[in-house]
Image (spheres, rainbow, N blue to C red):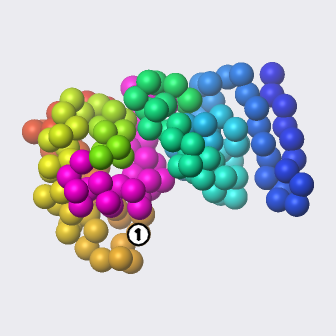
Amino acid sequence: MRSIVKIAGLGALLVASNAAADAYGPAGCGLGSLVFKPDSGFTQIFAATTNGTSGTQTFGISSGTSNCDPNKGGKLGAKAFVETNRTAMAKDISRGGGETITGLSEVAGCSNPTAVGAELQKNFKTIFPNAKVTDKAVSESVVKVLSEPSLSCTNLT
């Protein structure tokens, strides 16, 4: 059963759902996907903020909770994860490791997050050629790197 509450002054819909299998929007899985409807870009801002500030997205990806089923992500899930976590992802890719690379490895089904981090770091200048590169271009470049056979990322079909 769903209950919908309108947030005064914002026009966003807050959705409480018992069905964890509901689809998530561009903000990705995590607490935000359980709280906010995926049908509006406006509500996805709140979902992404909730996911980013609560830390539930990475936990959900690691544990398979909060709409984060690692076997359902595919390329779209990996791209959504990269686009949602772009700033943190850029920092972790520059370092060759970190929480976002671990989470992305889970989404993509990569068995070795350390190897993923090293490969992404090696390709940093291709992934982030300049500060104005779009989120979509970044996510496509990252998925291209993850698709390399040596990384054995099984969820990118």
Against 67, residue 97 (above or below) is below
What is the crowding at mark 1: few (fewer than 14 residues within 10 Å), some, or many (at least 20)? few
What type of secondary structure mainly makes up the magenta span? helix
Where is residue 141 shown, x and y percent of the image?
27, 58
Against 144, residue 127 (above or below) is below
Report the side of 67 relative to 12 (left or right).
left
Which portion, as a residue range, is magenta? Answer: 68-97
Nearest the eye: 30 or 79: 30
Nearest the eye: 23 or 15: 15
Report the side of 62 relative to 22 (left or right).
left
Nearest the eye: 131 or 25: 131
Where is residue 80 shown, x and y percent of the image?
45, 49
Magenta residue check for 73: yes
Mark 1: which amino acid? Thr
Q: Is residue 157 visible?
A: no
The residue under label 1 is: 134
Where is residue 81 shown, x and y percent of the image?
43, 47
**Furthest residue to the left?**
150
Q: Is residue 80 visible?
A: yes
SS at badge 1: loop
Nearest the eye: 23 or 46: 46
Where is residue 17 shown, x and y percent of the image?
73, 28
The image quarter in which residue 16 lies: top right
Looking at the rendered structure, the number of numbered marks drawn on it comes to: 1
The image quarter in which residue 111 lies: top left
Residue found at x 39% / y 52%: 82
Residue found at x 61% / y 37%: 31
Residue found at x 29% / y 31%: 109
Report the side of 5 relative to 80 (left or right).
right
Against 30, residue 26 (above or below) is below
Which quadrant, please, contains the N terminus? Answer: top right
